[in-house]
């Protein structure tokens, strides 16, 4: 599925979701109007009983007082806001005070008012039903392209899914839904706690000290609970490579690296104080601008690492599968390091795939990598000039159409600063052309993504959303939490509106 078609599919799905919600809301409104009209059908009978009770009340019959009260209460619950209800209420008040003649005057034209109210209820029901149908029809129609696009998306990934599915370990059907629900609970706690704690330190608001302390303590407690829940549930709810491919539909990005580097890639940096996402998650989030990111998982690991979606190859027959995946992928991102298998992958990628398809990530603090890489390149890479310190990634290497390497060093953006606070800011500000971009400039993963974007652009491969997606990946927990809160609010409002339908 092309990026444009995928964007159209997302737009149609979003429009369908909004339309379906509005159709449901309007359907509930129409059902409430129908219920109100049906309950008011007994108004003429109740009105006649009210007049009869007034006659008995005038004759001194004490039970008539209770009967008048019951009919007044019935009109209060079942009559619309109109003349009939106000007439009954006023007449009941006069009767309670013994002014029966005035009560009779109030209900003199009651039958006519009841007919007017019934006609108004009929009009409201007709209008609400028409509006509900007006929205229900496009909601149903939109489901057709949504399902067709979903099917087309899945069919586009059928070949690579077939390859990868053989190497995805089976899991109980309930495992991912259960831990996915737990993860969303964690996202909600995380976002709520972050918002409460941030609100408590706002200086522009005047609030009692006790409220400020409670907000801070409650926010920190919710934030901590959210982090614990997410640490437990997220790895258990992670998509497998096959699920990620089916969900996306585009050709994937194949992420290859040494298993020994997984711990470093799993580090969570301190550039954003409320960040819980690893370097690999940020890198995979940025690379999702191309397609789903898949990777071979480390054999024997109890849980998949977060970031690239995992599949697991047999240790004695993995080369043919990797070669096939190289062919089916649109981009190969290869983190250099130790291990003969890794350098075999470099050699095969260079020999069998288009040059611009390969991206090499060069780690810092490993001078032997430069010499080993030069053995596979037609011209020296001069990596020794850019590799510095023990950084996670020191340089990004891409190749032009003729296979010539282009080295792009990884480093912070010149002239940037980091803002700090009690909880820290979620990002740093960079002013460009009069605008402020909120991005985690000090984080290694962001620096790698920026260097990768520049490197790919130098060989004609461009993705405008690459850096933005990397930034969003840092704040995924917050955005998912806020989205959950909004969704729950909308759902709660819909349920609240529908509750009267179940009253007896």
Image (spheres, helix red, strand yellow):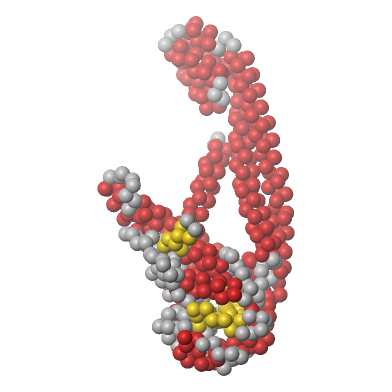
Residue at point 57% right, 38% down?
501
Judge left or right: residue 460 versus residue 446. right
Relative to 144, 22 lies left or right:
left
Q: Is residue 380 left or right of residue 355?
A: left
Tell me which residue sits at (52%, 13%) in the image: 53
| Residue 263 percent across, percent down from the top left | 45, 79
Give the residue at the far left of this rendering. 209
At a point 45% along the width and 90% down the height, the residue shown is 367
Relative vertical location of residue 474 with respect to residue 208 in this rendering, above or below: below
Pick the front one: 462 or 16 = 462
Q: 228 left or right of 206?
A: right
Q: Nearer the viewer, residue 494 or 209?
A: 209
Q: Residue 18, how many percent across, how many down?
A: 61, 48
Q: Residue at x 59, y 87 (%)?
A: 346
Quadrant assignment, res 133: top right
Depicted 194 relative to depicted 134: above or below: below
């Amino acid at each position: 599925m092309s990026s444009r078609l995928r964007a159209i599919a997302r737009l149609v799905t979003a429009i369908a979701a909004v339309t379906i919600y509005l159709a449901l809301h309007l359907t509930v409104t129409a059902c409430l109007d129908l219920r109100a009209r049906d309950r008011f059908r007994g108004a003429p009978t109740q009105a006649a009983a009210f007049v009869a009770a007034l006659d008995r009340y005038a004759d001194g019959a004490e039970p008539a007082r209770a009967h008048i009260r019951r009919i007044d209460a019935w009109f209060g619950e079942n009559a619309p806001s109109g003349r009939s209800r106000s007439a009954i209420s006023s007449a009941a008040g006069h009767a309670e005070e013994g002014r029966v003649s005035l009560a009779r005057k109030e209900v003199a034209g009651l039958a006519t008012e009841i007919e007017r109210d019934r006609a108004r209820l009929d009009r409201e029901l007709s209008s609400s039903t028409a509006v509900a149908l007006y929205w229900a029809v496009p909601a149903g129609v939109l489901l057709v392209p949504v399902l067709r696009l979903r099917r087309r998306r899945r069919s586009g990934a059928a070949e690579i899914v077939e390859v990868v599915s053989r190497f995805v370990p089976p899991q109980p059907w309930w495992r991912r839904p259960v831990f996915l629900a737990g993860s969303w609970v964690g996202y909600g706690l995380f976002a709520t706690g972050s918002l409460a704690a941030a609100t408590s330190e706002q200086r522009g608001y005047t609030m009692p000290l006790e409220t400020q302390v409670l907000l801070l303590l409650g926010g920190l407690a919710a934030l901590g609970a959210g982090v614990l829940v997410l640490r437990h549930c997220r790895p258990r709810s992670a998509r497998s490579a096959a699920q990620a491919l089916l969900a996306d539909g585009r050709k994937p990005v194949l992420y290859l690296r040494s298993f020994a580097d997984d711990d470093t890639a799993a580090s969570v940096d301190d550039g954003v104080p409320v960040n819980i996402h690893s370097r690999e998650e940020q890198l995979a989030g940025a690379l999702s601008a191309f397609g789903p990111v898949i990777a071979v998982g480390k054999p024997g690991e109890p849980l998949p690492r977060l970031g690239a979606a995992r599949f697991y190859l047999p240790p004695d027959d993995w080369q043919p599968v990797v070669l096939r995946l190289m062919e089916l992928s649109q981009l190969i991102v290869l983190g250099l390091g130790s291990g003969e298998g890794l350098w075999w992958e470099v050699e095969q990628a260079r020999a069998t795939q288009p040059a611009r398809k390969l991206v090499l990530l060069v780690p810092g603090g490993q001078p032997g990598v430069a010499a080993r890489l030069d053995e596979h390149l037609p011209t020296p890479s001069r990596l020794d000039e850019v590799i510095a310190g023990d950084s996670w990634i020191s340089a990004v290497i891409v190749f032009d159409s003729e296979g010539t390497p282009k080295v792009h060093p990884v480093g912070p953006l010149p002239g940037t600063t980091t803002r700090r606070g009690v909880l820290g800011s979620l990002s740093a500000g960079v002013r460009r052309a009069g605008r402020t971009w909120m991005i985690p400039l000090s984080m290694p993963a962001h620096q790698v993504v920026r260097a990768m974007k520049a490197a790919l652009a130098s060989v004609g491969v461009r993705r405008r959303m690459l850096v933005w997606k990397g930034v969003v990946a840092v704040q995924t927990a917050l955005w998912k939490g806020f989205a959950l809160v909004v969704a729950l609010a909308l759902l709660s409002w819909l349920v609240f509106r529908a509750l009267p339908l179940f009253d007896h």
